[in-house]
Image (spheres, grey):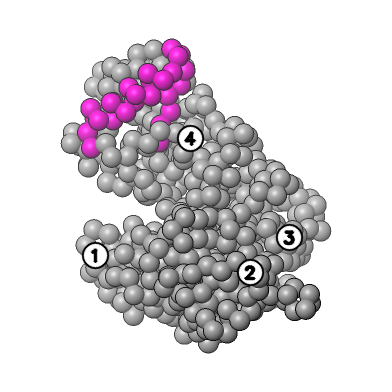
Amino acid sequence: MRQQESDKADIILHGGKVLTVSTNGSIEQAVAIKGESVQAVGTDQDVLALGGSSTKTIDLRGRTVIPGIIDIHAHMDREGLKRIFPSLGGATSIPEILGLIKQQVAQKRPGEWVTTMPVGDPPNYADMPASLQEGRFPNRWDLDKVSPNNPVYIRGTWTPWNVPPSVAIANSLALQLAGIDRNTQSPDSSVTIEHDDTGEPTGILVDIGRFPSVEFTLMKVVPRFTHQQRLAALKESMRLYNAVGTTGTYEGHGVAPEVLRVYKEVWDAKEMTVRAHLTLSPAWKSVAEADKEMERWAHSASGQGFGDDMLRISGYYIDYRGSRYTARARTAELPFTGWAGFAQSYNPPATFKRLVKLAAQHNLRVNTIVADCLEEVLDVFQDVHREIPIRGKRWMIGHVVETSPEQLKVIRELGLIVETIPLTHLWLRGRQYVGRAEAADTVVTHRDYLEQGVRFSLGTDNKPYSPFPTIWAAVARQERMTHEVLGPRQILTRMEALKAITMGGAYFSFEEERRGSLEAGKLADLAVLSDDYLTVPEDNISGLHSVLTMVGGQEVHSTGNI
């Protein structure tokens, strides 16, 4: 009798719609959990029969259950950091912005910094300053009116949240502390110190770089994230990600040592609630240094990596090309990485090829972003593959935008995995494809991936961190201003999009046999949704969230509504 009781489920969720995302795509009513794994999925009758006297039963009351989301371009550490600084969201005029600044000044002692998030509404801070009533940004003298005795710095956007430029604003005291006056020269042509008609700096600093450098050069004086802030922020980030059903991440853009240290501390304390697979962000300054660093990491970061179910490290992110100035400016301030969380490199084609070959020699998986350089990167990977086979190593190409059938054939033959950011490239930045049906059909070509057997998954890029706007973008493919559907042939069904961001994400981490679907023997990572994913109106997909999230059968989030 004891043996039989010990075989009973620990938890049973029943009376719902369980989207298993299994090979046959079955939709069940109930799921049983034993320990950290799924014991069974099936009908209410069959699964409830697995219950015993100590089994906890949860009546789903018709709610939808999905496997936990695996965000393969998460930048999870950033979300909590955003909560450190006051938001200017909702302000539609300069007086409203100044009112928010004034509130912050009132909480500070004279001389203390007031630092805020950018002008505009998160997560993208789009359409600024055109959306302000005045059609311009506030300047130093506007800020001086509410803060004559405190340095004020309105951060520019982290450019990938939107598109360049990134516009930061400093008041007079902040400029003085930074040593910026009418004679200060810009550190690079990508950075503009705006001046008025008399030659005085207005406090407006414009950065058109792919990754902003102002806080690494002109405004180094601005307070930086501390280790304790990053530590608290990562814990908060995990809480937020759990609340939208995310149970796993893959950080393919690389994680710098200051962020890796934070992850390790949270893991040491057994406080991880999101399974994180991290890729290393290099800080080497030469190919010779790279060779030594790769050799040091090869014993643990090679192949599928080193770690456990909650934290794993593997491979490197390696930049192709990039900006020499940006790399130099940001590298000079390491270990500080700002919003990035990763180091920035400049690798011209010949250097990139040497680095990639070294990685292959050390069996270190390569991750790189190819938004504007796919053909060149594929050429390099093919050359390396002829000497050191990489098929089966699951090298990752990220921010994949336009592809041709010939490129997809190469991607499949090399066994590369594709990361797409549909919300960015279709909704936020898709205007260039409006009215160009043939071009739009080559962008984020999910249907072509499926038909040609190319492995892929979806990432949020933390803008926003909820996976559901990203899923919506893959299903709707609408451009944000015109609402035109871009490349309708490439639309994914809801189930295909869900499979891409669950099973697809598991494949990125070599864990498709462990998680990504709700099947017996797999880890019990799941989310109970706020509405029916399959039937909610399409425009409402973006607003879905989790009312109950479990990681390994442990509750990590609950709204109390179930």
Q: Give the secondary structure at mark 1.
A: loop
Which residues are drawn in magenta?
92-117
Of 138 and 23, which appears nearest the observer?
23
On the picture, is 113 further left or further right than 483?
A: right
- Hey, what amino acid is under mark 4? Ile
Q: Give the secondary structure at mark 2.
A: loop
On the picture, is 35 further left or further right than 496?
A: right
Q: Nearer the viewer, mark 1 or mark 4?
A: 4
Q: Which residue is mark 4?
A: 84
Q: Earlier in the sequence, mark 3 or mark 1?
A: 3
Alpha carbons under labels 3 and 2: distance apart: 28 Å
Q: Percent from the top left, x then y, of residue 160?
A: 43, 50
Q: Percent from the top left, x then y, of residue 517?
A: 57, 75
Q: Earlier in the sequence, mark 1 or mark 4?
A: 4
Q: Give the secondary structure at mark 3.
A: loop
Identified at 68% across, 75% down, the residue is 8
Q: Residues within 10 Å of mark 3 (few under 14, many from 20)?
A: few
Disc on res. 483? 1
Q: Is residue 110 magenta?
A: yes
Q: Percent from the top left, x then y, of residue 10?
A: 65, 68
Q: Which residue is mark 3?
A: 308
Q: Earlier in the sequence, mark 2 or mark 4?
A: 2
Would you place residue 177 above or below residue 502 in this image? above
Q: Which residue is mark 2?
A: 55
